[in-house]
Image: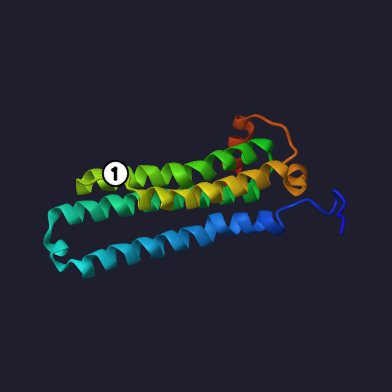
């Protein structure tokens, strides 16, 4: 089945799924996984609850998670509301930042706080998943006719930011 450019326009199909993933599915999954992982660690070692290092670790982990969630929501919101080429470029950068780069940062910070070697083979394998996710969505954003048709406006980043500020007025 072939679609015309008029049909391949707007936030629908895979593009809509990416927006929903960034604004809802990903953030909810991150929050649930963080809650479950911290709870499981504390159940496995009940002495952690009394440790000041554990309290610091939980604060750092929740801070990292909440910042990542905020970045995901903003990226999805912008992809759904600001139809400029700069939005696609911004989204591609953010996919890599909130995926593998953020994963490396998280592993490094937690490893530093825990005092161990955070970069073992199982951890590095886990970082491949967000890299594959970022690569797949990057290729989609670069190659999709719907994306090209929807985000076809030229404009500077300053114009895009001005549009964003107008939305909040």
The quadrant where residue 7 appears:
bottom right
Count the marks: how many?
1
Where's the C terminus, which quadrant? top right
User: Which residue is nearer to you in this view: 95 or 63?
Assistant: 95
Q: How is the image coloured?
A: rainbow
Left or right: 106, with 75 as reference point: left
Left or right: 6, with 112 as reference point: right
Q: Residues within 10 Å of mark 1 (few under 14, many from 20)?
A: some
Left or right: 153, with 166 as reference point: right
The quadrant where residue 84 appears:
top right
The quadrant where residue 159 appears:
top right
The residue identified by callout 1 is 109
Q: Is residue 29 above or below residue 137?
A: below
Residue 66: x, y in percent? 38, 53
Q: Is residue 47 above or below residue 146?
A: below
**Residue at the bottom extreme?**
43
User: Which residue is nearer to you in this view: 37 or 70?
Assistant: 37
Residue 31: x, y in percent? 40, 61
**Residue at the front extreme?**
121
Residue 116: x, y in percent? 22, 46
Q: Residue at x 58, y 41 (%)?
A: 92
Left or right: 135, with 112 as reference point: right
Q: Residue at x 56, y 58 (%)?
A: 21
Q: Is residue 62 above or below residue 153?
A: below
Residue 147: x, y in percent? 72, 46
Q: Residue at x 61, y 37 (%)?
A: 89
Circle 1 — which element? Answer: helix
Where's the N terminus, which quadrant? bottom right
User: Which residue is nearer to you in this view: 19 or 120?
Assistant: 120
Q: Residue at x 74, y 46 (%)?
A: 150
């Amino acid at each position: 089945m072939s679609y015309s450019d008029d049909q391949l326009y707007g936030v629908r199909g895979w593009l809509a799924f990416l927006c929903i993933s960034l604004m809802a599915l990903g953030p909810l999954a991150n929050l649930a996984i963080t809650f479950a992982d911290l709870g499981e660690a504390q159940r496995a070692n009940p002495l952690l609850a009394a440790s000041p290092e554990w309290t610091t670790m939980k604060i750092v982990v929740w801070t990292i998670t909440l910042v990542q969630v905020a970045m995901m929501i903003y990226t999805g919101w912008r992809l759904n509301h600001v139809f400029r080429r700069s939005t696609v470029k911004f989204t591609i950068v953010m996919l890599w930042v909130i995926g593998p780069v953020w994963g490396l940062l998280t592993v490094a910070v937690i490893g530093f706080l825990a005092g161990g070697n955070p970069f073992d083979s199982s951890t590095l394998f886990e970082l491949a998943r967000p890299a594959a996710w970022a690569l797949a969505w990057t290729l989609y954003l670069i190659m999709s006719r719907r994306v090209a048709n929807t985000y076809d406006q030229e404009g500077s980043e300053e114009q895009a930011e001005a549009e964003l500020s107008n939305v909040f007025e």
